[in-house]
Image (tube, helix red, strand yellow):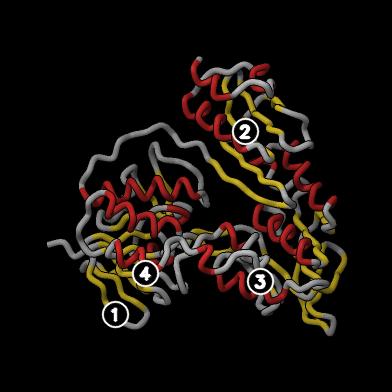
Amino acid sequence: MDHGVVVVGAGIGGVSVAAALRSHGYDGQVTLVDAGDFPHDRPPLSKAYLAGKASAADIALQPERWYDDHRVNLRCQSRVTALRCEGAVELDDGTMIAASRVVLATGATAARPTLPGIADDRIHVLRTVTDADRLAAALVPGARLLIVGAGLIGAEVASTAIDIGCAVTMVDPTETPLSQAFGADVADWLHGLATRRGVDVHAAAVHGFTPSPEGITATIGETSADFDAVLMAVGMRADTALAAAAGLRLDRGVVVDDAMVSSNSAILALGDAASPAGDFVGGRGHWETARMQADRVAATIVGQPVHARARLSPWFWTDRFGLHVEVVGEMCSGEGIVVRGTFGEPPFAVFALRGDKLVGAVGVDDNKSVRAAKRIIERNVSVDADALRDTARDLRSLLGR
């Protein structure tokens, strides 16, 4: 007897699983459980939503009626506290929901390092709408904001806060953050962009915080400074608490096979919470990966074959200081780079080559080049460096070689 599917977590992975189950013909009960107020998109939280340019409705993953139309039992503001071996999940109010299959789409939590004073309520993280609402209340013109971490979230919030009129300081112990993702040259140019747009940037570590009459004092390297608010943007950690309590195999996430099945055949996992083995690799924190994994989860549950496919190239994007940047592949694994356009003058693209194979690409206001590069990488097409440089040439023509 089928007791239905319970999906734990209503981010892009969880909602995509619910949609994929219906598109694959699953007719049983689907329950989607999430601790938040509503299923929402995360990328706008550091940008349009934080700036007040997008509403909660704008960032909802689906309109409210979608869940009824697709017979998805959505239970928000509910937390799953345990996975029961008898085939059920237990909620924080004691409710038990029967399930033949459980899908863990629990995502990740914002990292909060152990530092003196870290519990001060003026110190923020950014992972949910609630986090964004709290941070937005502190970002008023003239507010002194310290951002710890110059990765994607840190740089995006710096851009948003500068536009609001905040005085922004951004610190990171790394001289060139994200050089592995963007490649050293592009990473250095992007990091320098923050300084050119008015952010006070320091290569230093933060050692702790203390309250003061002037706000909150941060010890940065050998100095200290006062701020009105602090954002800790130092990465994320896979949310594996439920999986660990259930005895699942873990390795930087829930270990799953090509069918997204964990060490317990009744429990599947995807997205930031999962650590896939085999041929399905696409990078954590990426929309495309979560949606493709969701399709595999649904195929497994309905008993359809999960076909092997080529290794996915990691792909992500970021918006900062008025620029749209897309990255595909592994820029750090190239033996040399090729520039399309003029470096530092958008639109331009930078390609990483290993021999005659394209292994990575970055486009600054040039998403067409990155989309073509993704197809070239995944098809393992040999390319000529001069053809990549030639801005008059449509890169899609290289796929026919």
Q: Which residue is mark 4?
A: 33
- The 10 Å Cα crowd at callout 1, few under 14, some 14 to 19, many 20 or more, is few
- The 10 Å Cα crowd at callout 4, few under 14, some 14 to 19, many 20 or more, is many
The answer to which of marks 2 and 1 sits earlier in the sequence is 1
Q: In 3D space, how far apart are the residues under numbered discs 2 and 3 (Cα atoms)?
A: 33 Å
Q: Is residue 175 left or right of residue 101?
A: right
Give x and y (percent) for residue 49.
61, 65
The answer to which of marks 1 and 4 sits earlier in the sequence is 4
User: Of discs 1 and 4, which sits in the foreground?
Assistant: 4
The answer to which of marks 3 and 4 sits earlier in the sequence is 4
In the rendered structure, which amino acid carries the disc numbered 1? Thr
The answer to which of marks 2 and 3 sits earlier in the sequence is 3
**Which element carries disc 2, helix, strand or loop?**
strand
Tell me which residue sits at (59%, 71%) in the image. Answer: 131
Give the label on residue 124, or none.
3
Q: In 3D space, how far apart are the residues under numbered discs 3 and 1 (Cα atoms)?
A: 32 Å
Q: Quadrant of residue 360?
A: top right
